[in-house]
Amino acid sequence: MTWSPTRPARAGRVSTDATVGMLVVLAGLWMFLAPRFLAYESFTAVSGAERWAFPGTWSDKTAGLLIAAAMITRLVLPGLAQWCMAAVAAVGAWLVAAPFVLSYGSVSGTWPAIWNDVIGGVVLLLLAAAGALTARE
């Protein structure tokens, strides 16, 4: 008899699922921290508004918290994985629309926030689609 190692039937799925989940968590963490790292408070200084008045600050922080909540739910209740990925997709769609809905452009120099939200939203939409596919298998 010859010994031959075999892979567990679900090894590929778990690995891909975990990778997608970790990337979504990192994207959510970035969205929560982006206002600080991209200095969103400097946008309001130009317009004379209060530090937290820029709508992108609250939008991005809320998006990060919603992503965290969805991923914790997915971890605790794996049966809801597809719903959690749908929630992540909804947050991604919001991030793509937020700069236009909340008029980021009305404040001078906000292009870092605009690009951060649009690119971050597209990345989250792609990760949500990948996460939904791995959860379905």
Image (spheres, rainbow, N blue to C red):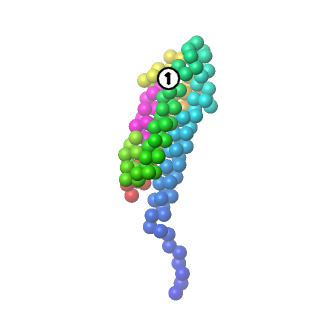
Q: Which of these two is toward me, 61 or 14? A: 61
Residue in the picture at 44% in, 67% down = 9
Q: Main secondary structure of the magenta part?
A: helix
The residue furthest bottom is 1
Q: Can you give x and y, in whole percent of width and height, for residue 128 in the image?
A: 43, 45
Q: Can you give x and y, in whole percent of width and height, for residue 15 in the image?
A: 50, 58
Residue in the picture at 59% in, 22% down = 41
**Amino acid type at image mark 1:** Pro
Q: Can you give x and y, in whole percent of width and height, for residue 101 in the image?
A: 42, 23
The residue furthest top is 48
Residue 12 part of the magenta segment: no
Q: Which residues are magenta?
A: 88-99
Q: Is 71 drawn above or below residue 114 in the view shown?
A: below
Q: Which residue is mark 1?
A: 55
Residue 80 visible to an observer of this rendering: yes
Q: Is 6 drawn above or below residue 29 in the view shown?
A: below
Q: Can you give x and y, in whole percent of width and height, for residue 89 in the image?
A: 41, 40
Residue in the picture at 53% in, 84% down = 2
Q: Is 133 drawn above or below residue 54 in the view shown?
A: below
Q: How many marks?
A: 1
Q: In the rendered image, which quarter contains the C terminus?
A: bottom left
Q: Is 37 drawn above or below residue 22 in the view shown?
A: above
Residue 124 visible to an observer of this rendering: no
Q: Which of these two is toward me, 58 or 130? A: 58
Residue 98 part of the magenta segment: yes
- SS for dot 1: helix
Structural crowding at the residue carrying mark 1, measured as other residues with C-alpha within 10 Å and reported as few (<14), some (14–19) or many (≥20) = some
Residue in the picture at 47% in, 68% down = 8
**Side (left or right) of 83 relative to 113:** left
Residue 110 picture quarter? top right
